[in-house]
Image: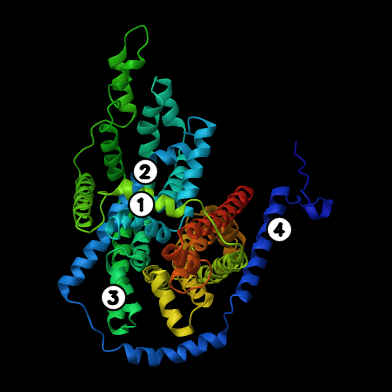
Amino acid sequence: MTAIITPVRPAARTGAKLPLPSRNALTAGALLLALLAVGLWSLSGVGLSWQQIARGVDYAGSFLARAVPFVWPSIPEILWLSALTLAIVFCGTAMAAIISIPVAYLAARNTTPTRLGGALGRFLGVATRAAPDAIMAMIFAMVIGQGALAGVLALGIHSVGMISKLTADAIEQVPDGPRLALRAAGATKSQEFWGAVWPQVLPAFIAIVLHRADINLRVSVILGFVGVAGLGQQLSIAMQTLNYREALPFAIIIFVLCVAFEIVSALIRRFLLGAPVARRTLAHRFVRALPGAEAGAGQNAGPSGQSATKGRSLGRAAGAGRVPWTADRLKSSALVWGTATLIGVSIALAATQESSFANFWKNLGIAAARLWPPALPPEKWEATAVALTETVQIAFAATLLALVGSMILGVFSARNVAPNPAVRGASRFALVVIRGLPELLLALFFIILTGLGPGAAVLALAIGGVGLLGKLFADSIEEVDRGPEGALKAVGATRTQVFTAATFPQATPALVGHTLYLLDTNIRSATVLGIVGGGGIGYMLSSAARINQHELLALLLCVLVIVFAVEGLASWLRRLIA
């Protein structure tokens, strides 16, 4: 008997309707349109025009004529200043990495012991990254004096916000299987975290720390303008005396150092994230260092007295078994010991500077009396509101321009979208070069060409944002599910059709999240660039730090309110599109 097959008619012919967007989707769309409108309004409000840029290009030739021939520092001076700058960066980043682990443990939803602990962890993360590092360096300089230590503390505390947040996100994404297995074996919460969660998070944590160290190297240039020793301080001295023949060589040295550090850190990340044995070795070292990894579970023994057996089971479950000495293990071990040696040398170099804790408590009392209570005269309220609005406009305008440039370079840097390897390689190289340019150097360059004001800060942050956002875009596009792309290619879709119908829709949530992250970063960067003449609240903060610290704290609290508001909006929008 032949089966009768009824043909399935298309939905359009049966009158079926497409599903309506959810309330979250509509809310997210409305918020994104509102943010786009704010970006366009900000771009028109910062006073940046093509005529201004054209005049700056014409002026560039005469400026370079006055800056050459360059006056280069001696080789020993270059090596010493570079080593001192890297020492401050390494010490600050290492300090932040250590502090970020407990903060991330509290902030992550699947490891926080209580709801109050989770709120505390998230608050610490937002608060530490909200305060501009340059302003913190000024405050620390009041307490311990100008020098390397003030820079280390400023970089370390500010970096906790980024490292702890990204690490908490990584902790929330790990599978629960290993953790539940240890819990079933009677492990404590500490053993669950160090034995099951942390080994899975460790590769991502290392990548995050390396990325933050790369950012801190560029930030160290800004700290030089507030008295922190290193290459940035020498650049600041040359710029303040209008000695461009000495300033540009220092700018070139900083650029080369940043690009070299970016390349080295990328190679380290590729090795650690691509070699399974290296990951196992690093996790193995962490677990073996914990006192309760192998035998500590004995305290959880039941009435049958099987403590030793349970301890050994937990040790094996936690990954504390023997790892063979392969080439990858040798490399990872050399990397661990090399990192420890590097940090030790960095501490020794940073300790040669003038900052110390000798009169810490005395100076702390003096600084606290200068800062508290916060006070802002009524006649400065209007100027403060205008400056805060200008800072927000700089951040939004720069993010919008960076978004346009990142969509171009980021798309052509993705392996699954670039037309050929040559285009992808050239785009990736361009992103590396752009990321090597510190925003402060770009801001100083545009201030020289276009004059003081927010326009220079917008151009600097926009170019710097392309380097960061373009790389994040490329990575997100490469990580999409290739199934829909292959299905469209199989039916003869063009490259453009595959991208618009399969690749881009899958990557959109990540792209929106990365853009919001850049906006959050640009709020703080716009504040800092104001110190060197980039407009906004930064100039008022810098003046208050030198004259009236009561106003400094009041202005800093205003900046924190703006940062918390943007952070909250970004978090809400990310939840809507998740």
Q: Real-space Cα distance between discs 2 and 4?
A: 38 Å
Q: Which residue is mark 3?
A: 250
Which callout, 2 or 1, points at the residue further toward the start of the chain? 2
Q: Which residue is mark 4?
A: 30
Of circles 1 and 4, the one toward us is 1
Which callout, 2 or 4, points at the residue further toward the start of the chain? 4
Q: Which residue is mark 2?
A: 99
Q: Secondary structure at mark 3?
A: helix
Horizontally, residue 493 falls left or right of residue 301, namely right
Q: Tell me the amino acid under the disc marked 2.
A: Ile
Disc number for residue 156? 1
Of circles 2 and 4, the one toward us is 2
Q: Is residue 11 above or below residue 236?
A: above
User: To which quarter of the image does residue 43 belong?
Assistant: bottom right
**Disc 3 to disc 4: CB gap under 8 Å:** no
Q: Secondary structure at mark 1?
A: helix
Q: Residues within 10 Å of mark 3 (few under 14, many from 20)?
A: many
Q: Tell me the amino acid under the disc marked 3.
A: Phe
Which callout, 3 or 1, points at the residue further toward the start of the chain? 1
Nearer the observer, 182 or 210: 210
Q: Real-space Cα distance between discs 3 and 2?
A: 33 Å
Q: Residues within 10 Å of mark 2 (few under 14, many from 20)?
A: some
Q: Tell me the amino acid under the disc marked 4.
A: Ala
**Disc 3 to disc 1: CB gap under 8 Å:** no
Which callout, 3 or 4, points at the residue further toward the start of the chain? 4
Identified at 36% across, 51% down, the residue is 156
Q: Tell me the amino acid under the disc marked 1.
A: Gly
Residue 108 appearing in the image: no
Relative image position of residue 505 (x, y in whole percent): 60, 58
Q: Secondary structure at mark 4?
A: helix
